[in-house]
Image: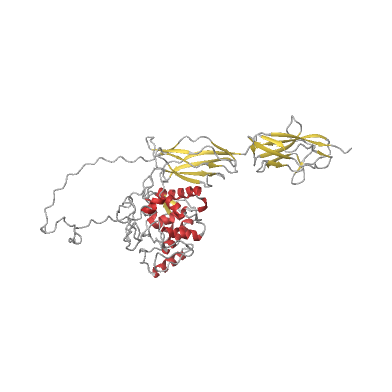
Amino acid sequence: MAAKFGRRLRRGATTTAVAALAVAALSASQAPAIVSGGGDGGGKQASGSSVPDSDGSASGDSSYHTDLPPLNTPNKPGTSIDLPGLGGESEAGIPASVLAAYKQAEQSIAITNPGCKLPWELLAAIGKVESGQARGGRVDSEGTTLTPILGPVLNGVGFANISDTDNGEYDGDKTHDRAVGPMQFIPSTWATWGQDANGDGREDPNNIFDAALAAGRYLCANNRDLSVQANLDQAILSYNRSNEYLATVLSWLDYYKRGTHEVPDGTGVLPTGPGPLNPGGSGNSPSPSPTPSKPGKTPSPGSSPSPQDPGDSPSPKPPKPPKPPTTTPPATPAPTVQRLENAGTGKLSATAGGAFAERVSVRGEDATGKAVGKVAVRFEIVGDTDATFTGGGKQATVTSGSDGVATAPALQAGENTGDFTVRASAVGRTVPALDFTATVTERQADAVVRTSDKELNAAPGAEFADAIEVKATNQGQTAGGVAVKATLVKSADDASPADKGPYFKGEDGQPLRSLEGLKTNDQGLLVLPKIYADDTTGTFLLRIETAGGATVTIELKVTAPA
């Protein structure tokens, strides 16, 4: 991995040289809005930030990884193809369940708080710096970390001093708090911001779906608009009050915006610098806490202390006979999703610009047909269409409930008519995708009338002075955007275009007696182009027909002057 730092940046411990080196490296990688942090590594605010120093932070100003992105960036923003596992392309890979959690959080907040404009790449940047993307994506099928991810004890030694607030429920420490989970929330902050994003009835900081949504809502607090740089800086600093932290997160944010791709869970790249995963600066998982020895007894290096009381003979005791092995029945393996089945999705059809009444719903099943819950299902709109899910996206990730069912957000039709596909696939699982066909039909009207009853007259060779306006409705409601066809017909019994009499003019000025491609406006109104009379006198018929079959016939009279 290119451009890394091998030491922890924490309060009172970061030198000016390291800070300057960080800024130089970040500038070389073209990271945006890098803030020079000075020499204290924390405490100081970024330029433009208005976060008071006295406020708390999501992670209690705990440790974090200072590894920087490689200087070579991914292919393009939004890249999702499988890239070779080399250099920057490997770093650009985000584990499937972790990536799904970030995108699901973005979509959820886009609906509940659209003014925040939270990009999922910001969650990915914080998740990278805080926990190395949940320890390289080492999560179970529900998105919960396989082993807890804990930050250092917040006892005031190098970090904030935060007394226990959760009675050790989340962090196992009843004296002081520790940051918990893939997004490193301290328990007191989690008590306020915790979310249940995977629908299991629990707000679990160790679950990446719950933690990502909680982090998103925390960053959007105080009506922040994260598209404004000052607000973005303020939000990141509220997570960990350090300018070096701000610079590192911004560098990963810029990196991920240039392109990412999905990798299987458990195969993500792990940080090598200090942090919650490897406090000593090496290794990929926390070391077990040492068992304290009794006062006054210091075991020699490389040996295990014997449980002796003071005054016991120093001679070694004979070894105890080994206990007979206990037989533990094998654990029943958790059900694994093997296929996705239609969970009752009906016909998917809507008129242009309208909402689909039906929603796509699938059910995850194991090999025996039993429901498998807590499966992240990605729904994608595929094909040449401007239809979207509610909120404007083309993708949505939903975690199935205990019944194995995941239901996509409602579909919204665009103006393009025709068929497209909604594809459902299990995130991070080699399960065949399930496709559904959706159809957008043109807007329709069941009635059309002329808005005036004034007689339409013209002299031979002249134009009709009065414009013709019609209004279309559907089930009594205004029908805007409805296609209309206007034809000067031969007779009431023959709807084919006439070969003489009144006419429209084409672009070349030549007579036209049939026009298509006309549409009503938002009020359901349509004003026809001008109509001209030839030298033939008499009464002629103009037939107006809408998509949906509504028609109206209008008389046109050509009369020679008296």
* Residue 1 location, quadrant: bottom left
Residue 227: percent from the left, percent from the top?
51, 57
Query: In the image, is 316 to the left or to the right of 208?
Result: left
**In front of the other: 80 or 236:** 236
Residue 394: percent from the left, percent from the top?
52, 46
Residue 254: percent from the left, percent from the top?
47, 59
Residue 276: percent from the left, percent from the top?
34, 57
Up-down relation of residue 488 to residue 224 (above or below): above
Toward the right, the furthest residue is 562
The type of colouring in the image is: secondary structure
Toward the top, the furthest residue is 493
Up-down relation of residue 153 to residue 423 (above or below): below
Does the rendering let one see residue 196? Answer: yes
Query: In the image, is 420 to the left or to the right of 558?
Result: left
Does the rendering let one see residue 269? Answer: no
Toward the bottom, the furthest residue is 17
**In front of the other: 366 or 345:** 345
Count of number-bearing discs: 0
**In front of the other: 151 or 98:** 151
Residue found 73% across the figure and 34% down from its top: 553
Residue found 35% across the figure and 55% down from its top: 179
